Image: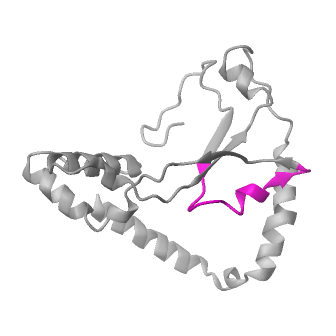
Amino acid sequence: MTEIEHRILPSHPYNRLVALTTTSAFGRSSIYNRLNYKGVAIAESLGYTEGYGTFHLMELYPLLCEFLESQGISTRSGFGAGPKPKWQTMALALHKLGLSSDLLHHGVKREVFLFRLVDNLEAYMEGRDTEPVYSNLPFSDLAAWWRERWLLPRAERVDGWREWRKDEIKRLLLLEQVKAAMYY
């Protein structure tokens, strides 16, 4: 089901989930590079991004939006829009101001990772194989491995979770929803 449109996509041979990607927060990832299951790497490093983004200009974002709005250009976006509208808004404002889009280059490279869900990823993506061959990694096995490898040791080392209270978490979540609704 799609998150924003709340609809189920029709089944089609080309809409199968065969891989996932992510990036590290900053630079080389010490977590994803160590992630393996029974000696097999789960996350495959593909290299690094060039270091473009908007985080270093976020203080200017309201001013850039105000400038575009004064030019009759809407900067509104809704829930789930993510960073792309911010990027587009900033790039457009910089262009309209006669400034280089190179200002979006912050230089902080992030490591890019691939999580293969199928054994024949390249052949399937290139059309040489017509069906994906999903890796035989039963969820129950992965969950048990995660519990023993990560959850229990971390729960022992970092025990702040023992102080969590259901009502306080609910109150904080509701407060965040109200703030988000006010922002959009």
Would residue 115 be found to the left or right of residue 175 on screen? right
* Number of numbered discs on residues: 0
Q: Name which residue lies at 43% across and 52% down.
A: 52
> Picture coordinates of residue 114 (x, y %)?
67, 42
Would residue 123 be found to the left or right of residue 169 on screen? right
Q: Is residue 159 magenta?
A: no
> Picture coordinates of residue 110 (x, y %)?
56, 55
Vertical comparison of 127 with 7: above or below: above
Would residue 113 be found to the left or right of residue 149 on screen? left
> Picture coordinates of residue 164 (x, y %)?
63, 81
Vertical comparison of 39 with 56: above or below: above
Would residue 81 be found to the left or right of residue 32 on screen? left
Q: Name which residue lies at 27% across and 52% down.
A: 90
Vertical comparison of 112 with 164: above or below: above
Residue 95, visible in the rendered structure: yes
Q: Name which residue lies at 29% across and 57% down.
A: 184
Vertical comparison of 134 with 161: above or below: above
Nearer to us in this view, 84 or 34 = 34
Nearer to us in this view, 92 or 169 = 92
Magenta-drawn segment: 22-39
Q: Name which residue lies at 73% across and 48% down.
A: 43
Nearer to us in this view, 4 or 136 = 136
> Picture coordinates of residue 100 (x, y %)?
25, 49
